Image (cartoon, coloured by chain):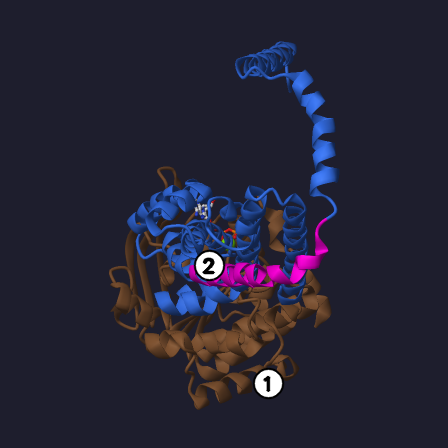
Amino acid sequence: MKPMLQIHGLKKQYGTSTVALNGIDLEVHPNEFIAVIGPSGAGKSTLLRCINRLIDPTAGSIAFLDQEIVGANKKQLRQIRSQIGMIFQHYNLVDRLSVLENVLHGRLGQMSAFNGVFSRYSEADKLQAIALLQKLGLEEQVYKRADELSGGQKQRVGICRALAQKPELILADEPIASLDPNSSKVVMDSLYANCKEQGIACLVNLHQVDVAKRYATRIVGIKSGRVVFDGSPEELTERMTQHIYEGKEHQMFQNGSAIEQAV
Amino acid sequence: MQTAAAVTQKKLKRNVSLAFFAAAVVFSLWYINFSFSEFIGGIPIFMNFLFTDFLPPKASDLPTYFGPVLDTLAYGVVATVLASVIGLVFGFLMARQTTPHPVIRTVMRGFISLLRNIPFLVWASILVVIFGVGSMPGIFSLILFGSGFLARVYAEAIEEIDSHATEALDAMGAGYLQKIKHAIIPQFVPGYISWTLFMFELSIRASAILGLVGAGGIGSQIKLTMDLFQYNRTSTVICILIVMILVIEFMTKRIRERLI
Ligand SMILES: Nc1ncnc2c1ncn2[C@@H]1O[C@H](COP(=O)(O)OP(=O)(O)OP(=O)(O)O)[C@@H](O)[C@H]1O
Ligand SMILES: [Mg+2]
């Protein structure tokens, strides 16, 4: 199958000295659920943010569905971004708006400026948003203000917002790093199930190796801005994990084993 | 860790600063011929004036001030609304996340800072010369000063908004106006209401001072009654002003608590 996302020689340097990404090559195929693991500061967030250009890469190329992202102009970039959902560690909802409005925000990228500014969402969009919220168990929360929700609920709203885009790809930057084990499990289950069902490819940054192994169809290990492992969860041996986290072993299991108990 | 030398140096610096401050005070007192005896001696005269000429307030002609009070409130509303509209436009041009271009931001900040740093009494004095004595120079100077003030505090309130939500909208391909509408404005509303109410309070307080340069409103009554040596009427006006300010402060506080 043809890859949907092709990253080639991706480099990112902050200032004059910090090299966050040092030549990343990565291909993502449709339907893949890829966990990106690696110690703190390895460059996981930078990699995800380069893909939708929240961060501008220093060098390299990124092709998404045959469109070049790195050289895209403003309009092209908006169009590309509208096909890529993003989920954040801190949920990044608009606190003072309702849950429904937050989910509808997912439609903005595909609407005209005028319709977007005046919230002229189509009836179909509204129905879809409510259906998504129901599916993720948030039917009681539809009209609540986003800041009234618990962390796990907020993250599920974040997932709904990403799904509302009807994206080809979802980028999730540590979606469960701020959640307790029970909520983490609900969030990961929802993300995984919906991506599988709708054929959405997903890149998830994770701190917890065991969570990565549980869900991922493929694991990418990053260390000091380079890909040091790329294979199936079975291929990720204990030794390999040690190598990826060398010197930072304590970061491998941060509340990850707790998810095991919550199952 | 601080070394002994650093501590000594700090002490020395502090003593030198204190000495400079003391010298400045002494010099200033001498320079303006400040007289303590006159100051102390003035207190009984002031008390006498306060209790014989000023008090009690003349309550009988309260109804005659109804008009000026209404004027002042209306000026306050008009000045606040217009200053808020102008302030919004400039505020959005000046705030980091919402400015169309960094150069516009810098230019606007400079312009607004100029506008804001001219005290509104100076505006009023200038405008009285241009428009003549009356209510217009009062309203205009409030609008000028208020626009500058609000532009600045609005811009600061926008810049303090958490960038998380804007980042999410960016990531999904929302445009400039969409981001302003859906991420910036909802989070800016509490700050906007709070500062606009404060501006209304300011404009009511300012009416006392504006009256002194003949710029209309209840403040004019202070000057008028004093020019006629009707001091117990002056005290009535002052009482009315204090009550107005207290009531408005109370109301704006309640509105703020409700909305945020
Ligand atoms: N805005 C920035 N300015 C300067 N340096 C940065 C910036 N963002 C990240 N870095 C640096 O780039 C490197 C990679 O950071 P990144 O956030 O991508 O790591 P990460 O793998 O996501 O880490 P974590 O697991 O802690 O989130 C780090 O050394 C970090 O200090
Ligand atoms: Mg990170």
Vertical placement of residue B126 versus B66, above or below: above
Give the magenta range: B57-82
Query: Mark 1 and 2 residues: CB-CB less than 8 Å, in contact?
Result: no
Spatial distance from mark 1 to mark 2, Cα to Cα? 48 Å
Q: What element carries label 1?
A: helix
Task: Identify residue type, mark 1.
Answer: Gln
Is the residue indicated by label 1 positioned so its CB lies within 8 Å of ligand 2?
no
Q: In the visual, does A66 lie left or right of A196? A: left
Question: Label 1, on which residue?
Answer: A134
Q: In this view, does B81 lie above or below B145?
A: below
Q: Position of residue B234 (x, y in %)?
A: 63, 47
In front of the other: B45 or A167: B45
Disc 2 secondary structure class: helix
Chain letter, colour brown: A
Residue A195, above or below B164:
below
**Amino acid type, callout 2:** Ala
Within 10 Å of disc 2 (Cα), the crowding (few <14, some 14-19, many 20+) is: many
Q: Chain B is drawn in which colour?
A: blue
- What chain does mark 1 sit on? A
Instruction: Give coordinates of residue A5: x percent, y percent.
Output: 34, 68
Q: In which quarter of the image is the C terminus of chain A?
A: bottom right
Q: Does the magenta stretch include residue B66?
A: yes
In this view of the protein, can residue B15 be seen by the observer? yes
Tell me residue B156's x, y (percent).
48, 50
Q: Which residue is drawn at 54% across and 87% down?
A: A131
Does residue A231 appear in the picture of this structure? no
Q: Name the residue under label 2.
A: B79
Give the main secondary structure, helix, strand or loop, of the magenta stretch.
helix
Closer to us: B199 or A231: B199
